[in-house]
Amino acid sequence: MFNRRNFLKACAVGGVGAGFGGLYDTFYHLIPFNDRGRKALHHVYGNSDSPEWLRDKASGKLAPNPDWILRHTVDQQCHSECGLRVKIDRKTGRVQRILGNPYHSHSRLDYASTDTPLLATAATPGTVCARGNSGIQSAYDPYRITVPLKRKGARGSGQWQPISWEQLIKEVTDGGKIFADTGDAASKDLDVLGFKGLYAQRDQLMNPNAPELGHRTNGYVFEGGRIVGSRKAFALRFGLAFGSVNTYEHTNTCEVSHHVATSQVYPGKHMTKPDIMEAEFIIFWGTQPGDANFPMQTMAKYAAEARAKPGGLKYVVVDPLLGRGGVMGDRAAWLPLIPGTDGALALAMIGWIIENERYNADYLGHPTQKAAEAASELSHTDATHLVIDDPAHPQHGHFLTAKLAGFAAGAQESETDRIVIDATSKAPLQAVDSPRAVIDYTGTVNGIRVKSAFARLRESAATHTLQQYADICGIDSEKIVNLAREFTSHGRKAACEMYRGVCKHPNGYYNSVAVLLLNLLVGNMNWTGGLTAGGGGYNYKKGRYDVMAVPAAKGVAYGVKLSREEVHYEDSSEYKAKVAAGQNPYPAKRPWFPLSFDMFSEILPSAVQRYPYGVDILLWHMATPFYSVPGQGNQQLIDAVKDPKNIPLIIASDIIVGDTSMYADYIVPDGSFLERWSHIDTLPTTLTRGTGLRWPVVALTEKTPDGRHMCLEEFLIDVAKRVGMPGYGDNAIPDASGRMWPLHRKEDWYLKATANLAFTPGSEGDQVPDVTDSEKQVNDLGGVHDEFKSSLAAEEWPKVLSVLAKGGRMEPSRNARQGDRLTHRFTKTLHFYAEEVALARNSMSGEDFFGTTTWVEPTTALGTPLDKLDDPKDWPLTIITFKGALQSHSRLSSNYVLREIMPDNGIQVAVEDARRMDIKDGEKVWVVTPHGKRLGTARVVEGIRPGVITFNVGYGHWGYGATNYQLGGKRIEGDRVRRAGIHLNPIMRRDPDIDQMTLMDLAGGSVVFFNTRARIEKNNVHA
Ligand code: SF4
């Protein structure tokens, strides 16, 4: 038998690889995780490495230690994407230590500008959090797969066979009876289409009766988990060149409703952030400094620094859970509201602020940016813009335009075409002609009933009294008033920050908008200490090369995505056919999501139900829907996915046999985050412009026959070339002069994207210098240049290597502010009223969505209130989740240094509840939901609202090295460390109205992680 200890030993001597037909010398790269029992190398310094820098005793000057290579890349131990300085043994090529990149804004407050010599940063590296620091163990995980695997036996039977790269590419591309050798009766005769067969149908419609569904090639679906920046662009480019619109990342499983709400209030922006360092007061809503958010460590540092300043930041955490950032005292407070009632609390505050005229009326009166700037304001809103408010009018819900208002021809149809009531003349005017307009207006213009956007919000907030809102959210009305008063007592230096706790409810979109609108009422956008949309990033897609262009593939990829997102059900042939047949078109078979994107949770159920069409090839990349999507790790859905008739070909791109990739037909070995490329813009906490560069600082997978390290990109390139797709091979990437460059290896593409980044013009002091000899030496860049010399024009290399040497490009931090104003400003119209939302419809109920926010009770898709669905008498507790600082994502389960600190997550129970249920801290208890039960360890804590229980996600794995499997006939034993703890996602509440759909926010698109009802039973009940 192969247990973990034997497995490690065998790997260490290369015995595992030798047993697999001599295909590769080794299958695994590993590190021994446990040094216990070994004698320390030095009696004082233990097993510490020598330092990265050496001080010359005579001169006192620092110099690089020649033993080490230092490379700067970007972390992916969470989505904060902080900059890293990676210390690599020059002799062995092995990573020894991870620090923060001092040139990256997420890793240092006063990050070094790109013209700062590397040596000058020796004593001031950046920071990483515990997760970032332990990333070495993600890369050198002993369960890493470094060669392609093919299933033996049935899908999910836990038996794998190593195969060659050539076999992998040939089988998945050419198709045919590729499972004849698996011994699986269900698939041995299955004739699989493969990429080539599907591509051959790129001119055929998916459904001739519904041409809007696009071509047959939409049957290829890329289901990405965590894939960001230019790596996502690379996958998207492949999909579009192939002819498929179905390239996804996981966003709706995270917090897409937050992004959708933000992009409605701040058009086109998915995230805004407070200027934490200069703010006087912040409400952290559904989040807190130090817990999951992005960038996590950066926000934690900012908040700690800002709080410690004399007269510095005060903040309040609004969340049922008091996490790490919930420091109490005179500068911080906690409001533990009932889960999912954030909108009620925010609307209560909005109502009080309006009633007591605590909003910034001067600011809100400017109908355009021009008018705002003339009055020394920095942004403007649609508060004064008139909306048609007459259900009988054909344009009900639209903004009133000049044409509808009867204005003379010649008016422009644009945002400035909207009509306002001018504050001086009290007459209707085009917004562009009015320097100041009436904020709160209800009346008639040209015979049409209208209301200003602000008036709509006021009325919406007034649908409940303060006390009613207080009862809904479980917060005393006095506390609500105090919070609203404090929030409106700091001028522009107050802001609301929000994250997943607000939005992952059936009413998440409306909750999120309500919180965001508080910012508009104080007019904090673009002010120092207020709110920012960030400095943005540099363009890596265009400039010297057009890395996204595939002209020959134009027009092939189009149509409705499998998840029916960004499209209205009412535009579908299905809807029209039902209406024509006199049928009620509602509800649709599964929801359509006109406002949302990346609807990851809908991929598997839609594929199995073939709605609106079936899937031929599913490519999972770092995707683990069975583990991560609430309610989807259930046996019924797993069995459906295991049936090859439902999805004939499933390929996983993964670094390990994961909790979901264990059900694939093939696994393509991928590089870890230390082996990948990606260009990633900094998050809006960074007030300046910045793009981090992740690039392979080590290479641990085996090589293809022509010497490329195996990974997702090389797989896509080789499939594309074998299929004969445009955009790959010899004539693939156009430069600015029209010359075509080849794409045979991933660097051919990523280096060109880096050249775009390096040569994008910047502001003053923001230019990329040429790389220096010292930087080349410390980063060991000579080999990079030599190996990939032909991928770029010669003159581009000095700047491209400079970007590699610094791990990206950042505008100097001194450019962040200009006195009381932020340098980078967001100047589009901020929306109290989202016309796009108001004109969209819920495809299940047939009701219109609301254009402004309102209090909406959480329900199922067809409107059953959750209290009626699961009676609180039987289910007295509500499960919420959190992502702690030490564990969250699957890959962290291999980080044994973190597991040693916190081996088990446990289920957190409030002291009051524990006393009532007679549960002791450390006692094993069952968490029971309407969909099943799980055993866990009770952790009795103070910082959680009674009636709520929670668990830190990332524990309780069944894959990812947690359980046994067969590899080439040998047994690989799972590790109990990775099995430890409780994971409740598989038993979270599914929506009874829709097959295999978790509870969802149908407006914003997020899955629901915070509304499953449960009870706790003592272990002896089920013993
Ligand atoms: S917050 Fe920590 S884990 Fe996340 S990217 Fe930054 S250093 Fe890495």
Image (spheres, helix red, strand yellow):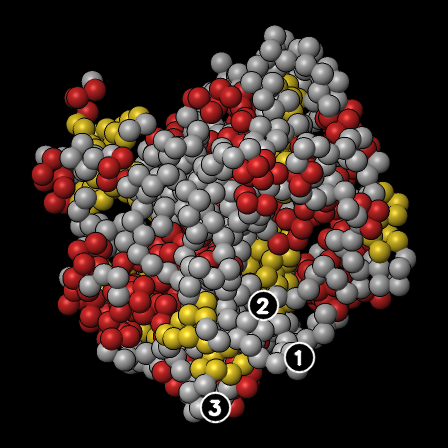
Locate residue 864: give its quadrant: top left
Please give left or right for residue 395 compared with residue 168 in the image. left
Q: Residue 697 — which label? A: none
Q: Tell me the amino acid under the disc marked 2.
A: Gly
Residue where numbered disc 1 is placed:
410
* Furthest residue toward front: 447
Please give left or right for residue 174 compared with residue 654 in the image. right
Q: Quadrant of the C terminus?
A: top left
Depth check, mark 3 against mark 1: the one in front is 1
Earlier-in-chain disc, 1 versus 2: 1
Where is residue 2? Give x, y as percent.
50, 18
Residue where numbered disc 3 is placed:
375
How far separated are the C-alphas under marks 1 and 2?
36 Å
Mark 2 falls on what kind of element? loop
The foreground one among 129 and 441 is 441
Earlier-in-chain disc, 2 versus 3: 3
Q: Tell me the amino acid under the disc marked 1.
A: Gly
Ligand 1 within 8 Å of disc 3? The answer is no
Where is residue 438? Give x, y as percent.
40, 82
Q: Residue 536 — which label? A: 2
Name which residue lies at 14% across and 41% down. Answer: 913
Within-10-Å neighbours for mark 1: few <14, some 14–19, many 20+: few
Q: Tell me the amino acid under the disc marked 3.
A: Ala
Earlier-in-chain disc, 3 versus 1: 3
Mark 3 falls on what kind of element? loop
